[in-house]
Image (cartoon, rainbow, N blue to C red):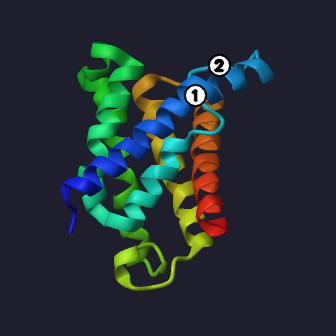
């Protein structure tokens, strides 16, 4: 059951991860890679939060993550971030993780749902995170007219964010 506490915690963790990217990781990335476009992060922590929320809550993760993602989207894009075209990037970020994890579980991949009672399959979660990153970058590519290089940057950042959080869970 998804309660208000879950929504507050998941959205807060998502927003905290995004603020860490904006306030800490982006400036470090600009320092070490000054020629790299700052439109994406090479370690996008919110992707890890999305994957783990989808693992823990399934499709209910959409409700849990949407408030934090909406606030984060507004912080990054302002009011112009809520035009029809740009909203698709927000929606894809929230919906793709549980949708793709559901499809992968129907295809026989196990360990993608905490509620299933199965032990987590870290490798499977990493693979799912990679598939989700590619799908998310593809939507950004189409909606925002990104170059293939920029889409590659989104994929790297999303996959690195998933890897970061999985390592934290494995160690912790």
Q: Which residue is drawn at 63% across and 68% down?
A: 170
Name the secondary structure under disc 2: loop
Give whichever of 5, 53 is nearer the camera. Answer: 5
Please say whether residue 147 is visible from this viewpoint: no
Q: Do the residues labelled 2 and 1 touch (CB within 8 Å)?
A: yes
Q: Position of residue 143 (x, y in %)?
A: 39, 28
> Residue beneath label 2, please?
37
| Image quarter of the N terminus | bottom left
Q: Which residue is drawn at 62% across and 66% down?
A: 172
Q: Where is residue 61 in the image (x, y as percent from the top left)?
A: 30, 56
Please say whether residue 57 is visible from this viewpoint: yes
Marks 2 and 1, how far apart in space?
7 Å
**Is residue 18 rendered to the left or right of residue 161?**
left
Name the image quarter holding residue 69.
top left
Name the image quarter holding residue 20.
top right
Q: Residues within 10 Å of mark 2 (few under 14, many from 20)?
A: few
Q: Any mark on residue 40, and which?
A: 1
Q: Residue at x 47, y 23 (%)?
A: 145
Q: Residues within 10 Å of mark 1 (few under 14, many from 20)?
A: many
Q: Residue at x 49, y 30 (%)?
A: 19
Q: Where is residue 123 in the image (x, y as percent from the top left)?
A: 62, 71
Residue 16 sits above or below residue 94 on the image: above
Residue 106 sits above or below residue 13 on the image: below
């Amino acid at each position: 059951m998804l309660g208000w506490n879950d929504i507050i915690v998941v959205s807060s963790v998502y927003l905290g991860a995004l603020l860490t990217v904006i306030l800490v990781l982006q400036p470090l990335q600009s320092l070490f890679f000054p020629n790299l476009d700052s439109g994406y992060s090479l370690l996008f922590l919110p992707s890890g939060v999305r994957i783990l929320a989808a693992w823990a809550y399934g499709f209910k993760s959409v409700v849990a993550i949407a408030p934090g993602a909406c606030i984060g989207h507004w912080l990054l894009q302002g009011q112009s971030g809520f035009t029809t075209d740009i909203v698709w990037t927000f929606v894809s970020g929230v919906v793709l993780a549980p949708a793709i994890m559901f499809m992968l579980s129907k295809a026989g991949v196990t360990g993608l749902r905490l509620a299933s009672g199965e032990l987590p399959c870290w490798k499977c979660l990493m693979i799912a995170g990679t598939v989700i990153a590619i799908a998310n970058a593809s939507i950004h590519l189409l909606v925002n007219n990104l170059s293939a290089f920029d889409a590659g940057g989104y994929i790297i950042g999303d996959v690195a964010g998933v890897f970061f959080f999985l390592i934290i869970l494995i160690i912790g």
